[in-house]
Amino acid sequence: MSQSAAVLDLELHPKQGIAFNTEATETLYGGAAGGGKSHLMRAAAITWCTEIAGLQVYLFRRIHDDLIKNHMEGPHGFRALLAGWVACGFCTIIEDEIRFWNGSKIYLCHCFNEKDRFKYQGAEIHVLLIDELTHFTEKIYRFLRNRVRMVGVKLPAKYVGKFPRILCGGNPGGIGHQFVKSTFIDGATEYATYRVSRSEGGMLRQFIPARLEDNPSMNDNDPGYEDRLYGLGSDGLVKAMRYGDWDIVEGAYFDNFERRRHVVKPFHIPEHWTRFRAGDWGSAKPFCFGWYAVASDDTIIAPGVVMPRGALVKYREWYGIKLDSSGKFIPDAGLKLHAEAVGAGVRQRDYEDTISYGVLDPAAFAQDGGPSIAERMTKGTNGTNGSTFRKADNKRTAHLGAMGGWDQLRGRLTGDEDGRPMLFFFETCIHTIRTLPALQHDEANAEDLDTKQEDHAADETRYACMSRPWAGKSKVPDPTVPKGHVKLPAPPEGTRGRRIAI
């Protein structure tokens, strides 16, 4: 084996180099497709393993086949990169594990279901690499982050303070889109490093955007790749995958939600409009309550914006979500309030409104040896300051001719025959606006959405829509008369349905 055969090609482009050399210990590198995330992870894993004896690197993808095809096999995978070193005896590859001469190891791991995370309960992860973080749930990510620790490993001076560490890559979309966006993107400045709270892991966090232009090797190796990105089929997908736009959600269940159409500034709601509320119960998970008004007539609510008769507007929201020590909300973590306190809180937030009725998650009416959650909410904290509800219609998808809740919600978002939405949200309903457009399809049932996501505001909105069913009307174009034919006059009034002499 010649010396040149043992030299590895681990060259990084400038943007990849920023992610490799950063002081941050919890980094998201990504955005657009083709930004060089996978090569960065392989190069970083090999380099750190050779320079730090006894290092344990765990590289994750959600699906095992993707892990092997993307990272182990192929012209740029570990087998090809390390072929010379394997021949020289510098390292060995045994199934999904790469062992180096100095005791360092790279483990190729997958975690398809949330229960699979427990396979790593006892792992000591010095470096956590997650490829396509948006394919994972927040629960899996938080669990794996909790296993990142380092004891008894001597670091070279240039690496002191940089380990243990996490490096993730990802594109917009996927089941984890919302938690990745809220964790790394929202409120953060690109490239800036900042210490997060203990409830968020306490690491030094950073977001490094990656674009196709940041990986010239992609164009050199596959000149047609950019054209195929533009051929994804929708402007939204192009913006997400070509330009890394995190406000566009690939595969969104409510892909017809548009902030410019459905979110409005608060306005004075006429007193005669019917008002009601809907609620989705939660304790360990957030609860969500929404207050709605029904437009009694076509009403101009802003310049050029007409709310049609029968449209709903969610004008108030109470979302029971936990905050960390810095005041930032923790996605999908509830307040764990008891039912009496929640009932009193709803009543308090009715203010002076005349509420015609309320609908609540049917699960809250279940009895298990004592009063139900709904009963306890009725009592409130002093026996008289609670709030009352009836059971909501909980049908999610259409079945045997019965309408489905998601169809009702989607139909109202699409709007009437003139393209006007039949469902609006005050811009103060921040959690509905935050979570609704990020929800994804259930992989096992495309007609339903994935319930592992933060779907509480969506459920509450669905209950509200089902309490006031709406059927859209389609405009039927006037029939066209073929060339050479004569259009007959309409029959006289009072003769429709009877035969008439011609």
Image (tube, rainbow, N blue to C red):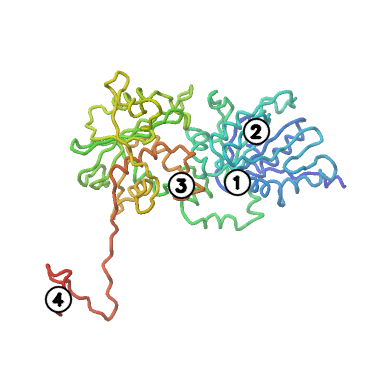
**Residue 490 to residue 36: above or below:** below
Mark sitting earlier along the chain (2/1): 1
Mark sitting on residue 500? 4
- The residue shown at (22%, 27%) is 352
Looking at the picture, tell me which residue is in the foreground, 473 or 481: 473
Residue at far front of view: 369
- Quarter of the image that includes the C terminus: bottom left
Mark sitting earlier along the chain (2/3): 2
Residue at far bottom of view: 484
Packing grade of label 4 (10 A; few <14, some 14-19, many >=20) is: few
Cα separation, mark 4 vs mark 2, equals 81 Å
Question: Mark 3, mark 1: which one is toward the viewer?
Answer: 3
Residue position for label 1 = 35
Packing grade of label 2 (10 A; few <14, some 14-19, many >=20) is: some
- The residue shown at (48%, 21%) is 325
Cα separation, mark 1 vs mark 4, equals 72 Å
Cα separation, mark 3 vs mark 4, equals 54 Å
Q: Are marks 3 and 4 in contact (CB under 8 Å)?
A: no
Q: Are marks 2 and 3 in contact (CB under 8 Å)?
A: no
Packing grade of label 1 (10 A; few <14, some 14-19, many >=20) is: many
**Residue 152 to residue 209: above or below:** above
Residue 46 as seen in the image, left or right of residue 322:
right
Residue position for label 3 = 252
**Residue 132 to residue 289: above or below:** below
Residue 314 as seen in the image, left or right of residue 122:
left
Amino acid type, mark 4:
Ile
- The residue shown at (50%, 37%) is 181
Q: Are marks 4 and 2 in contact (CB under 8 Å)?
A: no
Mark sitting on residue 356? none
At which x and y percent is residue 150? 69, 26
Mark sitting earlier along the chain (3/4): 3
